Image (cartoon, helix red, strand yellow):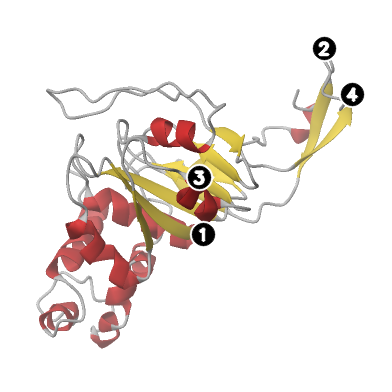
């Protein structure tokens, strides 16, 4: 139960709280949440890039695991980049987990993200999860991704007792069906926690100032130093075009960054 003195302050998965009452954990025990301890990190998103309402996904996590399928559904680079921006904003490390490697090769995504210093792990159904479990050991990691990318399958492999429901991808729309309806924290065998979250259709970044979005693109930050004051990164005088032409970053990365900015200015 949440105590009245907390008022309208919400409690989210990952919060550390103070309790009073019967904290034995026995059947029919009753305790109240009377305070929420200061959070070390907050992972947030909005419904879209114009939404004024922030949604706190989890608190106190130190690693964001971006789960992306290599096929069925097709990977969306824009989603990965948005999650990387959100992780940077929250002060969290990022790990990209590419699933369904038995259906498509990971080469293209490895070429994009490994040079950025982002950890990338490739897996397929039936793989031994011990290496990935080691990457999550003694950490609080939150799994985020579209529906149907294999998050629940991954969770069941990492924590066999979890028994998370596994869905499928609609052959017509290419979208997965929601199988997890709420975030759930699970303790890993050997130490650490993972937080499984419901699949998301979008990852809005309205809570992040437009001028800070580039900080989630480390390969473009240095190049932007040559931009004129108040550069929108869309005009002809933008220095990022020359930066990419000189081979310091790929056109695909610049296109993804500009798409973020465009969606902020014109969500349609």
Q: Residues within 10 Å of mark 3 (few under 14, many from 20)?
A: many
Q: Residue at x 14, y 23 (%)?
A: 171
Q: Residue at x 32, y 31 (%)?
A: 147
Q: Which residue is mark 3?
A: 142
Q: CA distance from mark 1 to mark 2?
A: 37 Å
Q: From the top left corner, tell me how far across and down residue 199 is, in percent.
A: 37, 33
Local secondary structure at mark 3:
strand
Q: Residue at x 50, y 38 (%)?
A: 158
Residue 28 is labelled as: 2
Q: Which residue is mark 1?
A: 92
Q: CA distance from mark 1 to mark 3?
A: 10 Å
Q: CA distance from mark 4 to mark 2?
A: 9 Å
Q: From the top left corner, tell me how far across and down residue 61 is, in percent.
A: 58, 50
Residue 22 is labelled as: 4
Mark 3 or mark 2: whose residue is earlier in sequence: 2
Q: Residue at x 23, y 25 (%)?
A: 169
């Amino acid at each position: 139960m949440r105590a009245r003195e907390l008022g309208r302050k919400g409690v989210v998965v990952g919060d550390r709280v103070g309790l009073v009452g019967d904290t034995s954990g026995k059947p029919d025990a009753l305790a109240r949440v009377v305070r929420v301890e200061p959070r070390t990190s907050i992972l947030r998103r909005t419904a879209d890039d114009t939404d004024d309402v922030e949604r706190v996904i989890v608190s106190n996590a130190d690693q964001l695991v971006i789960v992306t399928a290599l096929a069925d559904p097709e990977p969306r680079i824009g989603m990965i980049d948005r999650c990387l921006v959100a992780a940077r904003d929250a002060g969290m490390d990022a790990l990209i987990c590419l699933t369904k490697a038995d259906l498509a090769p990971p080469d293209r995504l490895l070429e994009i993200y490994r040079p950025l210093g982002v950890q990338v792990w490739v897996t397929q159904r039936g793989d031994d999860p011990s290496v990935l479990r080691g990457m999550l050991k003694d950490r609080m990691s939150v799994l985020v991704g579209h529906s149907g990318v294999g998050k629940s399958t991954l969770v069941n492999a990492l924590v066999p007792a979890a028994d998370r429901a596994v869905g499928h991808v609609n052959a017509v729309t290419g979208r997965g069906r929601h199988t997890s309806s709420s975030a759930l924290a699970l303790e890993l065998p050997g130490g650490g926690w993972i937080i499984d979250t419901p699949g998301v259709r979008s990852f809005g970044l309205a809570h992040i100032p437009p001028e800070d979005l580039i900080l989630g693109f480390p390969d473009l930050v240095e190049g932007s130093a040559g931009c004129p004051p108040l550069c929108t990164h869309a005009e002809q005088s933008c220095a990022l075009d020359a930066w990419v032409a000189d081979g310091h970053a790929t056109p695909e990365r610049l296109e993804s960054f500009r798409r973020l900015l465009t969606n902020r200015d014109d969500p349609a």
